[in-house]
Image (cartoon, coloured by chain):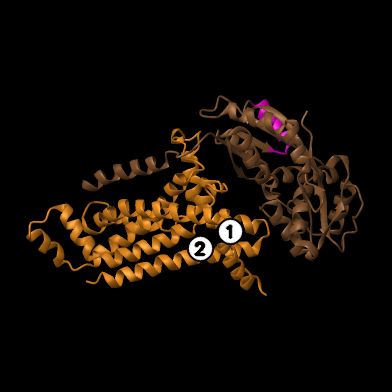
Chain colours: A brown, B orange
Amino acid sequence: MFWQKLLFPVVLALVLISSPVQAGEILMMATTTSTDNTGLLDYLAPVFEKDTGITLRWVAVGTGKALQLGRNCDVDILFVHAPAAEKKFVKNGFGTNRQQVMYNDFVIIGPVEDPAGIKGLTPNAALKKIEKKQALFLSRGDNSGTNKKERALWKQALGWVPEKQQWYLQTGQGMLSTINMAAEKKGYTLTDRGTWIKYMAQKGEANQLMIVVEGDSGLFNQYSVITINKDCPKVQTALADRFTRWVTSEKIQQLIKDFRLLGQPLFIPSAK
Amino acid sequence: MTLFTEGFVRALQLLASGDPGVYSAIGATVTVSTWSLAASLVIGVPAGFMLGYCRFPGKRIVRTIVDTLLALPTVFIGLVVYTLLSRSGPLGELNLLFSLSGIAIGQTVLGLPIIIALTASQVETLDQRLYSTLIGLGARPAQVLLATVLEARFGLLAAAVTAYGRILTEVGISMMVGGNIKYHTRTITTAIALETGKGEFITGIALGLVLLAIALVVNGSLSVLKKRWPV
């Protein structure tokens, strides 16, 4: 049939068009929404390209999906924040060379009226009180680093995660979306401090939320990079290791320290 | 000002400022949707012609399948194409994941059933005497196809516009297969999803209006083409 003759050139053309017209090398990264939403990667990527000639491209998803993309060999490097899941990932042979890059902390935010009256409490006491008062709480519900942390905090406070409760809403969306929903619905939520500062910078005077719980050692939020295992076909281990060396270097650690919004640092460098 | 009017002003500002992110998203959207439409047409028109013109066993089943595929959700296409193009999938060798070509493949899957189904209906509704006349004049199959397609050109144009509209506005495939990478695979729709996610509703609305403007330009030029290309 003549249309079969047509099919082949079309598929061929599609493949040819797609053959990369790229100058230089490209490092593919999967990362969490916070490094992207805060603008940190937009700030670092041009410097990386200038220093090494490598273009950095990233897909910003929750940590859970980022780990899955790594497991599928679809990226070269991960930049994520869920230490327990990361260690398991490396232990299972999916990644190597895990290095700490920076940290910030998680905070519980809520309406300025603080309907559950939890301001200044410890995370444990605050969550217990939210449950008792059945105050509205928004969860990312997307298996992201923040969601994993939040579930762990509930388990610590109650011994269980209040998944099926009327007052516990799972948004299934990124951090900034979830903060927006918390503001609209007057609920509490857990966020990393970087995204929270970004939200405040965006909202300005119109902000209806405040930090109610912070400063507990249990709210520490560590970000690390992990190179995807070189057993993956096509994974660019050398480029990934170069990024790791670069991002943990003194110069870039200083750049991360200088990355501020509203005069506040979003991340604190912590490479060893 | 309401969000919408503010969005309109912002749209004009964004376009005037020459923001590289916005222009890159517009470029990606136009490029990838054009590839997808072209591939859908090149594969879909002959296939639709066959479906409408030829008689073969199981024709009704094929027809039902094609019609069902019209309802394919874009996130599902995105998921299937992702699993095919993933480095751990069967086509991983081609390195098409997180590229515009990857998106184009997914969008072609989206556009194909529309082109095939509408072409087939169009061919079926043509004057039956056309075929007998063509055959009588000694036309070869390729010539029959060409003459029929020419005869059905307005219907095909409508099919192309419908498919283009669906391709231009989809977000699931671009997000999953393209990965929403800035300056690379970020299209207008995935940029809207991102900006909305960040709470930048005004920028989101502005981008939506830009997308609408593109659709207007495409449809406008097609209607001019239709006038200049009379029966």
Q: How many marks?
A: 2
Location of residue A169 in the rendering, given as x and y in whole percent from the top left corner? 73, 56
Residue at left offset 52%, top offset 48%: B185
Q: Tell me which chain the residue with mark 2 is part of.
A: B
In depth, the one of B61 and A272 nearer the eye is A272
Q: Pointer 2: what residue?
A: B211
Overall secondary structure of the magenta section:
helix
Q: Amino acid at mark 1?
A: Ile
Location of residue A101 in the rendering, given as x and y in whole percent from the top left corner? 74, 34
* Range shown magenta: A80-92
Q: Residue furthest bottom?
A: B1
Q: Tell me which chain the residue with mark 1 is part of.
A: B
Mark 2 or mark 1: whose residue is earlier in sequence: 1
Question: Would you say the residues marked 2 and 1 are in contact, meaning their CB atoms lie under 8 Å apart?
Answer: yes
| Circle number at residue B192 | 1
Residue at left offset 16%, top offset 57%: B144
